[in-house]
Amino acid sequence: MTPPAKPYRRWARLGVAAAVACGVCCALPLITLLGGIGVVSSLGAIFKVFELASIVLAVLAFSGAAVLWVRRLHRTACRVPGRAVERVVDLGMPDPTQRGPR
């Protein structure tokens, strides 16, 4: 059996690099989030002020997310036809008795 050609190795290396980059891209925000939670938790265990501040920040974050969620639901539910973005054109019903162009 002959060894694989050099372009195959290049694509294999590129695939491995893409998989590693994908893992790093997805892992870094999670590590940052968990690290931030850990830092705030440890500061909250040491100082009581950080405990209260972290609770207030969590409530503000969840309320902000809820407001954005409700606004998005309201925006998609209350669309008005005839805006510049969405125009409704009434084509009418075709008349089967007429043949050819009018």
Image: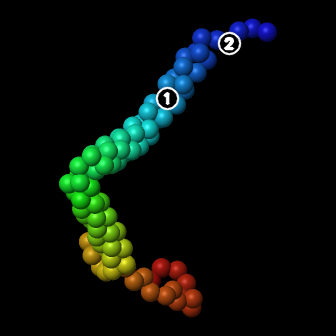
Kindly tell me whether residue 43 is visible in this rendering: yes
Q: Closest to the observer: 22 or 43?
A: 43
Using the rendered view, name the quadrant where residue 25 is placed: top left
**In the image as oriented, which residue stretches furthest toward the left?**
49
The answer to whether 1 is drawn above or below residue 50 in the figure is above
The residue at the point 33 percent across, 76 percent down is 74
7 vs 49, nearest the viewer = 49
Image quadrant for the N terminus? top right
Going by the numbered disc 1, the residue's amino acid type is: Val
Q: Which mark is residue 43?
A: none
Distance of label 1 from label 2 (alpha carbons): 23 Å
Observer-nearest of 42 and 64: 42
Q: Is residue 1 left or right of residue 45?
A: right
Q: Is residue 43 above or below residue 3?
A: below
Quarter occupied by residue 56? bottom left
Q: Residue furthest right?
A: 1
Q: Identify the image quadrant of residue 87.
A: bottom left
Q: Which mark is residue 4?
A: 2
Q: Which quarter of the rendering shows the C terminus?
A: bottom left
Q: Earlier in the sequence, mark 1 or mark 2?
A: 2
Q: Residues within 10 Å of mark 1 (few under 14, many from 20)?
A: few
Disc 2 residue type (three-letter): Pro
Q: Determine whether, in the image, residue 98 is placed left or right of residue 88.
A: right
Q: Which mark is residue 20?
A: 1
Q: In this rendering, would 73 be left or right of 1?
A: left
Q: Residue at x 28, y 64 (%)?
A: 59
Helix, strand or loop under label 1:
helix
Give coordinates of residue 96: x percent, y percent: 57, 88
